[in-house]
Amino acid sequence: MTLAARRDEPVVCDHCGRSVRRMSRQQKFCSARCQNKARWRVISSKMAQGSQTTWDHQNFDNENNALQVDFSRPRTPKMPLRMEWGGFAVVPDQQWPGMYRVRMPGGRVTDMVNLTRARDAAQALAGL
Ligand SMILES: [Zn+2]
C-alpha cells in the first residue's frame, strides 16, 4: 500500500508523464483529456483480452447479421421517387410540409393528400 500523496506534491500524469500542479489528492492525470485517453486505453485492452470469446469476429458477424448497417454507402442521396405519370404530376403542397397534390395536365390540382396517396392517384389518373 502506498501512502496518500501530499496535497502539494505535483502529479505525474499516468498517461503522458507530464508533471502538473496537484488539484486533488487522488489525481492521477494532468488533464481530463489524459484521463479519458487512459480510460479508453484500458477499455480497448480489455476488449482485446476478451477477443477469444465475446469479441470473436466470426461470432460477432454471425449473431448480428440482421442488424448490420452498411456504413460504406452514403445514406443521404435518397432514391429519387418517380413523381409524374402521363402529365399527372405529384407536387408538394405549398402550405403543409409532407402533404401533396396531383397536378393534372390542365393545371388543376387534386385535394391535399399524403405522398403515397398522391402517387397512387397520379398513376390511377394516368390510367396505369
Ligand atoms: Zn497527461
Image: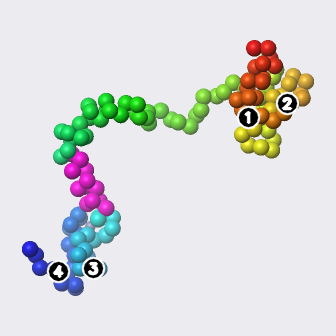
**Residue mark closest to the camera, 4 vs 1:** 1
The residue that label 2 is drawn on is 110
Is label 4's Cβ within 8 Å of ligand 1?
no
Q: Which residue is mark 1?
A: 114
The residue at the far top in this view is: 128
Under mark 4, the amino acid is Ala
1 versus 57 height, above or below: below
Residue 55 coordinates in the image, percent (x, y): 25, 40
Q: CA distance from mark 1 to mark 2?
A: 12 Å
Is 46 within the magenta? Answer: yes
Position of 85 compared to 71: left or right? Answer: right
Marking on residue 24? 3
Mark 3 crowd level (few <14, some 14–19, many ≥20, 10 Å Cα): few
**Residue at figure coordinates x 23%, y 64% from the top left:** 16
Asked if residue 64 is positioned above or below residue 16 in the image, the reply reads: above
| Amino acid carrying mark 2 in the image | Thr
User: Compared with residue 90, is residue 16 higher up or lower down, i.e. above or below?
Assistant: below
**Disc 4 vs disc 3: Cβ atoms closer than 8 Å?**
no
Q: Quadrant of ligand 1?
A: bottom left
Measured as percent of width and height from the top left, residue 12 is found at 20, 72
* Mark 3–mark 2 distance (CA, rounded to whole Å): 71 Å
Q: Which residues are magenta?
A: 36-48
Q: Secondary structure at mark 3?
A: loop
Q: Mark 1–mark 3 contact, CB under 8 Å?
A: no
- The residue labelled by disc 4 is 5
Nearer mark to the viewer, of 2 and 4:
2
- Vertical placement of residue 34 versus 66, above or below: below
Regarding mark 4 in the picture, which secondary structure is present there? loop
